[in-house]
Image (cartoon, grey):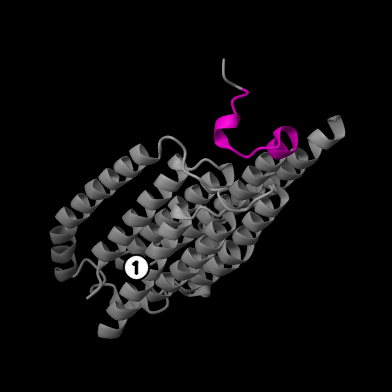
């Protein structure tokens, strides 16, 4: 029997894997990929709570759709920033992006 | 029920292995492909949760658009060798420790709260109580009724966010070329 806990554990595992990818990677595009995986884990949480909750209207799924829209916008802007930085510095390594360092 | 748990564990294994391969892979292109595989597996998990519309949107937006956007981003920031483009930084070990600790904490909380959710569903509050209306709750009709009814203003706001992101991405992508 697959219950709410199994979905939540899967979501927590994906969130932690995404966290490792977002924090520990050297390439800015890989960092963005980790953030996407974390957003996906949150979506899975919302849909699972919607499925196993007692609410009749699919509120959780509507929230998941909004998160997907915001994630798409985030990727578009993030990749545009990375491309601009690559054009200026010929590097996508996160450690090189220290222009705001005092 | 047996088929459902078989499908769940199969897809969960595929997703977790793809996600791990995405993080551990040293080639950035392989990482992007494993990310697309993980997103595709998530769509099947949504189908198991009877969220048909979210599953379709997941395939359309994540697998179709975002993965392709990532591949374009990788192609446009090209380097001489594609191997070794996706190394860990110097905090790799620390990040693994924190990630494992975070997962242990979350799993502990989920397992500890498991008894509460089980008794709630046994008392008729959970899915057993709402079984009648559940068959159609994931359909496009019920979600569109919600999105265009009660959530019409947030829907318009998210459209505005997408428009702002579109113009912002174009402005950021073009601005420096004009100034140089």
Q: Nearer the viewer, residue B106 or A43?
A: B106
Q: How many marks?
A: 1
Estimate the x, y position of residue B112 in percent, counting from the top left: 15, 54
Q: Secondary structure at mark 1?
A: helix
Circle 1 crowding by C-alpha within 10 Å: few under 14, some 14–19, many from 20: many
**Disc 1 is attached to a residue of which chain?**
A
- Looking at this view, is B140 or B2 the one in front? B2
* Residue A33 is a magenta residue: no
Give whichever of A4, B121 is nearer the camera: A4
Displayed quadrant of residue B113: bottom left
| Above or below for B156 versus B142 | above
Res B171 quadrant in image: top right
Query: Is residue A13 visible in the rendered structure shown here?
Result: yes
Locate the N terminus of chain B and report the quarter of the image it occupies.
Answer: bottom left
Looking at this view, name the residue that lies furthest to the top.
A102
Q: Is residue B108 left or right of residue B96?
A: left
| Residue B14 shown left or right of residue B148 in the figure | left
Q: Which residues are magenta?
A: A84-99
Q: What residue sits 28% from the left and 49% below the top?
A: B103
In the drawing, does residue B32 fall left or right of residue B1? Answer: right
Q: Position of residue A47 (x, y in %)?
A: 39, 63
x and y percentages locating residue B106 in the rendered image:
25, 49
In the picture, which quadrant includes the C terminus of chain B?
top right
Residue B59 location in percent, x, y? 55, 69
- Which residue position holds label 1? A51
Image point 44% across, 63% down: which residue?
B18
Q: Residue at x 18, y 57 (%)?
A: B111
Residue at (31%, 73%) from the top-left corner? Answer: B9
Q: Is residue B149 among the parts visible in the rendering?
A: no
| Whether residue B141 is situated above or below residue B101 in the rendered picture | below
């Amino acid at each position: 029997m697959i219950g709410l806990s199994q979905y939540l554990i899967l979501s927590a595992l994906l969130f932690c894997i995404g966290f490792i990818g977002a924090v520990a990677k050297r390439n800015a595009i890989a960092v963005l990929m980790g953030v996407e995986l974390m957003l996906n884990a949150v979506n899975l949480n919302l849909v699972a709570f919607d499925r196993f909750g007692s609410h009749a209207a699919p509120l959780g799924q509507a929230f998941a759709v909004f998160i997907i829209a915001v994630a798409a916008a985030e990727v578009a802007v993030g990749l545009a920033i990375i491309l601009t930085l690559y054009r200026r510095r010929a590097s996508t390594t996160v450690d090189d992006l220290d222009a705001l360092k005092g | 029920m047996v088929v459902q748990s078989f499908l769940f564990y199969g897809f969960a294994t595929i997703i977790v292995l793809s996600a791990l391969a995405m993080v551990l892979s040293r080639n950035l292109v392989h990482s992007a492909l494993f990310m697309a595989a993980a997103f595709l597996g998530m769509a099947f998990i949504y189908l198991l949760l009877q969220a048909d519309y979210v599953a379709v949107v997941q395939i359309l937006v994540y697998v179709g658009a975002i993965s392709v956007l990532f591949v374009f981003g990788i192609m446009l920031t090209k380097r001489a060798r594609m191997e070794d483009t996706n190394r860990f930084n110097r905090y790799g070990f620390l990040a693994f420790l924190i990630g494992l600790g975070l997962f242990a904490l979350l799993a502990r909380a989920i397992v500890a709260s498991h008894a509460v959710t089980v008794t709630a569903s046994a008392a008729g509050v959970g899915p057993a109580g709402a079984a009648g209306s559940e068959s159609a709750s994931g359909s496009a009709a019920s979600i569109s009724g919600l999105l265009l009814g009660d959530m019409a203003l947030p829907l318009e706001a998210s459209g505005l966010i997408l428009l702002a992101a579109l113009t912002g991405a174009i402005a950021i992508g073009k601005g420096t070329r004009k100034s140089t």
